[in-house]
Image (cartoon, grey):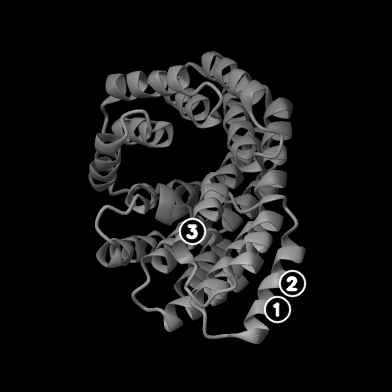
Amino acid sequence: MRSFISALLLCCCSQLCAAQADTLALNKAEGLAKKGKYDDAIVIYDSLLAKDSSISTYYDMRGWVYYAQNKFQQAGDDINRALRLEPNNAIHYFHRAALMYSTENPTMAIQDCDDALKYMVPGDSMKIRVLMVRGSSKEMKRDFTGAYEDYKIVLEHDSTNCESLSNLGMVLSDLKREKEAMRCLEKVVRLCPEQPIGYSNLALLQQNSGDYKKSIETINEGLKHLLADDNGGRAIMYNNRGYDELKLQKLQEAMNDINQSLKLYPTNSYALRNRALVYLAMKQKDKACEDLREAMKQGFTLMYGNEVRELMKANCPADSILDDEDNMNR
């Protein structure tokens, strides 16, 4: 999800700036944010809001800078303020949808995407990005048919949209259409060799088919093309390679890669599940159970099914499982 924040920031000002907004200051803040100077950008937004707190654009844009800093609570508070000021603003709904997806709340993300589409001006190019977020959110909810339909609409507008092609490939795999999925992801690698998402998902399909060595080769190739600051993409690749190494009984290599993945992306419940499997293979059940409990708290079941719960029942003390279930139901 973080991969498209820069694209959002690029498009925000031209679409968001109201007539009374200080466009010059907004452009300066946007430029600072693109350079990673987030605190400096926030100073400008704070100043603008001190002058006029009635302009929703200021809250929306500051929210996106908070998002880039992983300050999700502040981001959500600002975007909610923007929506209270302009409850029919499609872009505010879209931005909150992206935030909801990033924080693993697909139900809210889908609703916000629907509202964004409802309030959008006909012909708005933002529709493609909204459908991408909605498709990804449906995929997170395991509504693979719904996700497939959204990605197909995107591809009808742009048949070379590599992100949508890659997502479509994974949905086809979830729908048990493996040959189509493999062709789709091979096409992504051909069309967009500079985008690691194709390599990452192609490797995952190879992994799912049991070809762990081939999956590692694909990930290694993808890492060569990865931008140095793409921590999200790097985290996914390290996690997937770690699982390949686990299956090949290279336990220390697996642990190193998954730890590196979690260092880059600490709230990845799937990486926690993978590290728990490595700990189990190393006969370290206590550490495995710690990771399984944390994976549950981070929403593994919602996104991926009951596997972690079953692993806990098989390996962890019964009282710890009950405690975890109680926490989830509060």
The mark lying in front, picked from 3 and 1, is 3
Q: Residue at x 65, y 39 (%)?
A: 230
Q: Mark 2 and mark 1: span between their CA atoms? A: 6 Å
Q: Mark 3 and mark 2: span between their CA atoms? A: 21 Å
Q: Residue at x 72, y 50 (%)?
A: 35
Badge number at residue 43: 2
Q: Judge whether residue 269 can be spotted in this image.
A: no
> Image quarter for residue 253?
top right
Mark nearer the N terminus (3 vs 1)? 3
Percent position of residue 112, x then y:
35, 66
Percent position of residue 204, x then y:
47, 28
Percent position of residue 320, x then y:
58, 63
Mark 2, Cα crowd under 10 Å, few <14 / some 14-19 / many 20+, is few
Locate residue 14 relative to residue 44 in the image: left or right. left
Q: Residue at x 54, y 58 (%)?
A: 298
Q: Residue at x 43, y 68 (%)?
A: 92
What amino acid is found at the position of numbered circle 1 in the picture? Ser
Depth check: give the residue in front, 222 or 10.
Answer: 10
Depth check: give the residue in front, 188 or 52.
Answer: 52
What amino acid is found at the position of numbered circle 3 in the picture? Ser
Task: Determine whether 110 is above or below 179 in the image.
Answer: below
Percent position of residue 321, x then y:
53, 61
Mark 3, Cα crowd under 10 Å, few <14 / some 14-19 / many 20+, is few
Q: Judge whether residue 219 can be spotted in this image.
A: yes
| Residue that mark 3 sits on | 14
Badge number at residue 47: 1
What amino acid is found at the position of numbered circle 2 in the picture? Val
Q: Mark 3 and mark 1: span between their CA atoms? A: 20 Å
